[in-house]
Amino acid sequence: MPLSDLVRTLNHPKSGLPAHYSRSGLDQPFVAADGRVFLHFANIRLESQFLPIVETASGKLHGHAASLQAFGLSNRIPLLPESVFVLPTDNEEFVYLDRLVRTLHALNYLTQPERGNLLLKVHARHILSVSSQHGLAFEEILKPCGLLPEQITLEMDINGINDAEHLIRAVNSYRSRGYGIAIGQFGRKKLDFGLLRELQPDIVKLDQSLLSSDRPIARIIETIQQLPARVMVDNIELTALRKPILASGIDLLGVSSSSKIGLDLESRQADFRCASNRSAA
């Protein structure tokens, strides 16, 4: 289905999507233009950005991590993406916005020449605000896009969730529908390996503060991989990968578009392979 038709389908009040996908005053939030989709919410224009995720052992593209860009609707002044999520007035509207953002990314991912797996963030407040059947509403939204939960990995920050039992039920629900699970910012506050064993994630993203600390990184990486889960870092300078443990231990690397190194993806892949080979020598 052409992108413009998908947008009309999702914007239509009788599209058959979940009831809380449509709210009065927020009709037709998606706009298709120039081969892309934008989201309008509270006089803010939201856009998708996709950062490559590379398998460090082979240099192959694993997929992309979606991130959000926000601009004033009329003045195009850049805004912090996080500031958008302070606007909802209640939990229902927050869940609606969080789901809209992931739908925006799913629509724009259809235009990517190379896709792979799509990493999407789910906010802690969303997880805690939904009582049961996590992932069902988003699965119904993905269907007209021609995407399956198996093509999506949902990333969640467990540092912001104190109700471990609710979190475990939510993760089990997501996994039962086919979604992959990623734990983000692991080690920012504490190293809760017991909870990781309960959650059994596919990917664990190490927090930047952990990489620069004096904690035993080698042992941490080994413990995560024994779960088993793949270890991922993002927004890291390539020079840091020359440290033997990082080069040999990291499974996935998120490539930041703001990196000052200025290498294209092919050059980065070559550097990953070289770094890994040096550490194995």
Image (cartoon, rainbow, N blue to C red):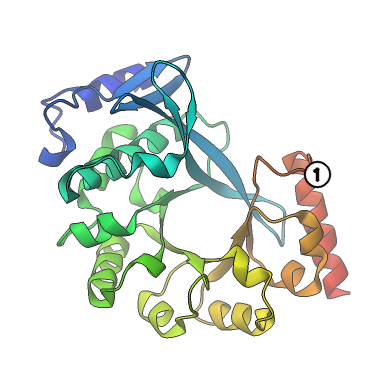
Q: Quadrant of the C terminus?
A: bottom right
Could you tell me which quadrant the N terminus lies in? top left
What residue appears at the point 87 percent right and 68 percent down from the top-left corner?
Answer: 278
Number of numbered tags placed on the structure image: 1
Q: Is residue 18 left or right of residue 265?
A: left
Q: Is residue 197 above or below residue 176?
A: below
- Which residue is found at the position 28% from the left and 73% from the top? 168
161 to 10, vertically: above or below: below
The residue shown at (22%, 71%) is 166
| Residue 252 horizontal/vertical position (percent) | 62, 60
Q: Position of residue 49 (x, y in %)?
A: 52, 36
Type of amino acid under label 1: Ser
Q: Nearer the viewer, residue 35 or 211?
A: 211
Q: Helix, strand, or loop for circle 1?
A: helix
Report the front residue among 238 and 69.
69
Q: For mark 1, does the 10 Å Cα neighbourhood hold few (<14), some (14 to 19), or many (20 or more) residues? A: few
At a point 58% along the width and 68% down the height, the residue shown is: 231
> Quarter of the image holding residue 261?
top right
Q: Which residue is denoted by mark 1 in the rendering? A: 267
Q: Is residue 2 visible?
A: no
Q: Nearer the viewer, residue 72 or 227?
A: 72
* Left or right, 45 with reference to 207: left
Residue 217 image offset from top left, x and y in percent? 66, 79
The location of residue 221, given as percent across then percent down, is 62, 77
Query: Is residue 122 something that shows in the picture?
Result: yes
Q: Nearer the viewer, residue 68 or 232?
A: 68
Q: Is residue 174 above or below residue 152?
A: below
| Quadrant of residue 58 within the rendered picture | bottom right
Judge left or right: residue 43 versus residue 180.
left
